[in-house]
Image (cartoon, coloured by chain):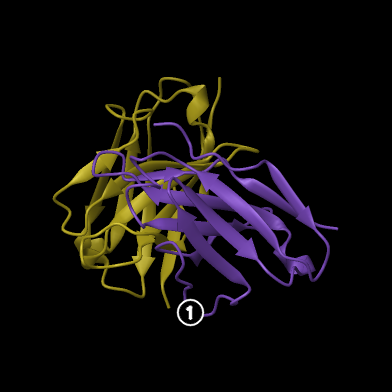
Amino acid sequence: QSALAQPASVSGSPGQSITISCTGTSSDVGRYYLVSWYQQHPGKAPKLIIYEGSERPSGVTNRFSGSKSGNTASLTISGLQAEDEADYYCCSYAGISTVYIFGTGTKVTVL
Amino acid sequence: EVQLVESGGELVQPGGSLRLSCAASGFTFSTYAMNWVRQAPGKGLEWVSTMSNTGGSTYYADSVKGRFTISRDISKNTLYLQMNSLRAEDTAVYYCTKDLWYTGSYSAADHWGQGTLVTVSS
């Protein structure tokens, strides 16, 4: 299976909202509500920020929100802050043989 | 506090073998699915392998199937990845991750180790 498609980069000014898309197929994103999102700062391990499409783990700011429509999931960051500058990856459960499939990753730049 | 600590990464020649370890603590290791995820230098994340919460099932990405083996030792709270017939394209940081739920369903990786670097080169 191919990686889920994400835009290579998204940018915004402090305080603005941005949305990152994650496009899969009817075999992964479209079939299961099991999309997760990860934030990765340079040189650090990824951190879970959204699971099961729209749920936030304890301690994650509510400025992050997730949604899904058809084969496309989305991550919205509202009230953009300098600390949000990082790489973001989506991931979907893809069935019992290929358990997880990641997105291509999106670099978020705060202008 | 959940902790995952990987070790075993090093420089290895093409065709060689390596075993990665992931020492887990802070949770009941025997009841959660565990995964290996890798990231080649400057590239994105790639799922490598999963062991089910019972330990009875294992799954592999096509890129490593037949060459890599995931296993665990419950008595040592340790997850392993045996890597054989290594190729240059296996060069990456390898992360050990814990699945979110203990129920046996696969959802997300809620904890990650710091990663261990494997370099395959002559």
Residue at position x 65%, y 42% from top? A7
Question: Image quadrant for the C terminus of chain A?
Answer: bottom right
Type of the residue with mark 1: Ser
Q: Quadrant of residue B39?
A: top right
Residue at position x 35%, y 66% from top? B100
Of residues A110 and B114, the one drawn nearer to the viewer in this rendering: A110
Q: Badge 1 sits on which subunit?
A: A
Q: Is residue A30 above or below residue B107?
A: above
Residue at position x 22%, y 53% from top? B52
User: Is residue A46 something that shows in the picture?
Assistant: no
- Whole-percent x and y of residue A33? 36, 57
Of residues B95 and A83, the one drawn nearer to the viewer in this rendering: A83
Question: Image quadrant for the N terminus of chain A?
Answer: top left
- Whole-percent x and y of residue A93? 35, 49
Q: Is residue B49 above or below residue B67?
A: below
Q: Residues within 10 Å of mark 1 (few under 14, many from 20)?
A: few
Residue at position x 36%, y 40% from top? A26
- Whole-percent x and y of residue A92? 40, 49
Chain identity for the colour yellow used in the image: B
Chain identity for the colour purple used in the image: A
Mark 1 — residue? A58
- Whole-percent x and y of residue A45? 56, 57
The answer to whether residue A99 is left or right of residue A85 is: left
Circle 1 SS class:
loop
User: Is residue B44 something that shows in the picture?
Assistant: yes
Q: Is residue B25 above or below residue B119?
A: below
Of residues B115 and B101, the one drawn nearer to the viewer in this rendering: B101
Of residues B20 and A33, the one drawn nearer to the viewer in this rendering: A33
Q: Quadrant of residue B65?
A: top left
